[in-house]
Image (cartoon, rainbow, N blue to C red):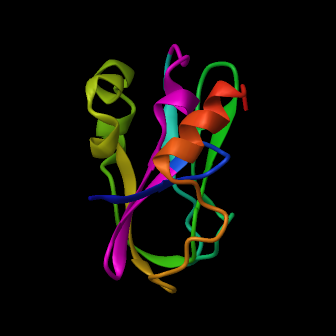
Amino acid sequence: MRDHYFTSEHEWIDFQGSVAYIGVCNYKVSKLKTIEKIVFPKSSCIKKKGDVLAVIYTKTGKIPIHMPVDGKILNLKNVVVLTDLENFLQQPEKDRWLAFIGLTKPYERMGLMQIDQYKHFIKRGS
């Protein structure tokens, strides 16, 4: 069973012990027509829950991706791969991670939703 959770801002986190992968949900990106670029802020490798992890730029605006938990950035996905929207959307959601992090609090799940809760959240139109 996966230890997979979601945020109300449509990011996901896949916990794997003391590390985790963070990605963006289909709901947040499925209606995009293009991705111009993805920018990862150059601030410290330690990020707090709610901090901006990355910003997706489109022709019409920008979409922030937030940290779902506190952690240290260990690895970021290749940005060139991420800007190919067609390829990006064809990948299974679980493979669309943006960052691999070391968790500050490996057992913290406060404010996160499990899959059934997230599906209900989306159905409500949030």
Q: Position of residue 34 (x, y in %)?
A: 49, 18
Q: Is residue 119 magenta?
A: no
Question: Looking at this view, is 110 or 92 the one in front?
Answer: 110
Q: Reply above or below: 9 against 93.
A: below
In the picture, measured across the screen, residue 66 lies left or right of residue 93, that is right
Q: Reply above or below: 110 against 95.
A: below
> How many numbered markers are drawn?
0
Residue 45 shows up from this direction: no
Question: Looking at this view, is 75 or 67 the one in front?
Answer: 67
| Residue located at (64% from left, 71% from top) | 110
Q: Reply above or below: 84 against 55.
A: above
Q: Quadrant of the C terminus?
A: top right
**Quarter residue 53 falls in:** bottom right
**Quarter residue 124 falls in:** top right
| Residue located at (26% from left, 30% from top) | 91
Q: Position of residue 89 (x, y in %)?
A: 35, 24
Question: Looking at this view, is 79 or 125 the one in front?
Answer: 125
In the picture, measured across the screen, residue 91 lies left or right of residue 24, that is left
Q: Position of residue 115 (x, y in %)?
A: 47, 46
| Residue located at (39% from left, 31% from top) | 83
Q: Position of residue 104 (x, y in %)?
A: 50, 86
| Residue located at (58% from left, 62% from top) | 67
Q: Which residues are magenta?
A: 12-33
In the picture, measured across the screen, residue 68 lies left or right of residue 73, that is right
Q: Quadrant of the N terminus?
A: bottom left
